[in-house]
């Protein structure tokens, strides 16, 4: 699951960010150089009222992504 945007809920940063969340991996890849290939568009960027609302949306996004990729267990590692 990948976000390309400005992360408006948690950052007041005008710079574009790319954040990738792996559904079926428990490896620590922070800072690693990766090549990604988007498979589908899930939704546009939104600014949420707070971090808890964002987390709730991300749980739904994760579930929808898992369904689109055919993961039966919700994509948990």
Image (cartoon, rainbow, N blue to C red):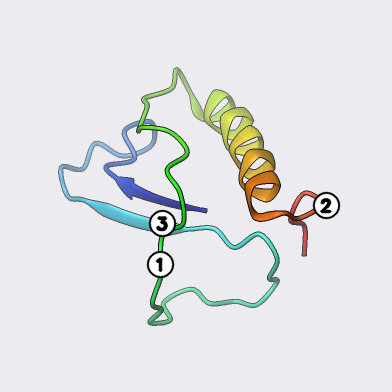
* Mark 2 secondary-structure assignment: loop
> At x 70% / y 71%, what residue is drawn?
26
Q: How many C-alpha atoms fall within 10 Å of the one at disc 3: few (<14), some, or many (≥20)?
A: few
In percent of width and height, residue 60 lies at 64, 33
Depth check, front residue: 8 or 1: 1
Mark 3 vs mark 2: in front: 2
For marks 1 and 3, the one nearer the N-term is 3
Q: Which disc number belongs to residue 70?
A: none
Q: Distance between the residues labelled 1 and 2?
A: 22 Å
In percent of width and height, residue 24 lies at 70, 65
* Mark 3 secondary-structure assignment: strand
In percent of width and height, residue 6 lies at 27, 42
Name the residue beneath numbered marker 2: 72
| Picture layout, residue 18 above or below residue 60 | below
| Picture layout, residue 5 above or below residue 26 | above
Q: Which disc number belongs to residue 19?
A: 3
> At x 41% / y 56%, what residue is drawn?
19
Q: In which quarter of the image is the C terminus?
A: bottom right
Name the residue beneath numbered marker 1: 37
For marks 1 and 2, the one nearer the N-term is 1
In percent of width and height, residue 44 lies at 36, 32
Q: Give the image quarter of residue 14.
A: top left
| Picture layout, residue 64 above or below residue 38 | above
> At x 47% / y 39%, what residue is drawn?
42
């Amino acid at each position: 699951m990948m976000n390309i945007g400005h992360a408006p809920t948690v950052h007041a940063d005008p710079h574009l960010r790319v954040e990738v969340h792996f559904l079926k991996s428990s490896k620590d890849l922070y800072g690693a150089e990766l090549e990604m290939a988007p498979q589908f568009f899930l939704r546009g960027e939104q600014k949420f009222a707070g971090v808890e609302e964002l987390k709730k949306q991300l749980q739904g996004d994760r579930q929808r992504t898992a369904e689109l990729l055919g993961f039966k267990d919700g994509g948990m590692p």
